[in-house]
Image (cartoon, helix red, strand yellow):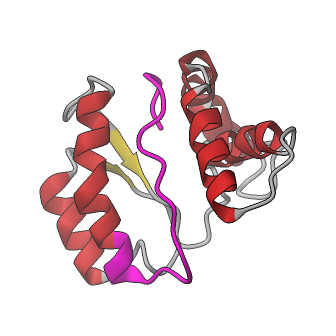
Amino acid sequence: MSASGLGNLIFIDGIINHAHYLNILRDNLKLSAQNLDIRNNFVFYQDNNPKHKALNVRLWCLYNCPQNFKTPPQSPDLNSIEHICRELEVRVRKHDIKTKSELKRVMMAEWMNIDAEITKKLVKSIPKRLKAVVDTKGYSTKY
């Protein structure tokens, strides 16, 4: 996600490991940035999930992401995408879904309907989120 809107929604079957995660990045990060018309003008944020910190992922990001937002090992979750996931969940729950394929179809349709104003507001909130973390000395915030 970016202030310009949402990138590709990728469906994952099963448990994802660092190699699978890297393939998702390779196949989608630059394409999403291009589709959002931000090209290489973005800061890439990942939390401290072990698959995000794997050597192959870090090396790929070093050479393929213009800027990376570094987080300390015990950082609070500042990932704005969590709010988008919640928005998607609320929208999807309004549907009477019976099958996995119907769930995917509804999720994709609702993903495409999430307005860029929502993502813009979330991205603009990041400085406030960071200040809140500093103010609480790394403890929980309202975010």
Span shown in magenta: 1-21
Relative horizontal placement of residue 66, taking residue 139 as reference (left or right): left
Relative horizontal placement of residue 57, taking residue 94 as reference (left or right): left
Q: Main secondary structure of the magenta part?
A: loop
Q: Is residue 67 visible?
A: no
Q: Is residue 101 visible?
A: yes
- Above or below: residue 13 compared with residue 82: below
Which is nearer the eye, 51 or 20? 20
Which is nearer the eye, 45 or 104? 104
Instruction: Give coordinates of residue 23: x percent, y percent.
Output: 28, 69
Is 100 a magenta residue? Answer: no
Relative horizontal placement of residue 17, taking residue 118 as reference (left or right): left
Is 5 a magenta residue? Answer: yes
Which is nearer the eye, 66 or 31? 31
Quarter assignment of residue 80? top right
Image point (62%, 21%), residue name = 121
Quarter assignment of residue 62? bottom left
Image point (74%, 42%), residue name = 135
**Quadrant in which the C terminus is drawn:** top right
- Above or below: residue 99 compared with residue 91: below
Image point (38%, 72%), residue name = 21
Instruction: Give coordinates of residue 106: x percent, y percent.
Output: 66, 43
Image point (81%, 47%), residue name = 141
Relative horizontal placement of residue 63, taking residue 132 as reference (left or right): left
Instruction: Give coordinates of residue 58: x percent, y percent.
Output: 27, 71
Instruction: Give coordinates of residue 114: x percent, y percent.
Output: 62, 27
- Above or below: residue 113 compared with residue 56: above
- Above or below: residue 42 compared with residue 77: above
- Please count the marks in the image: 0
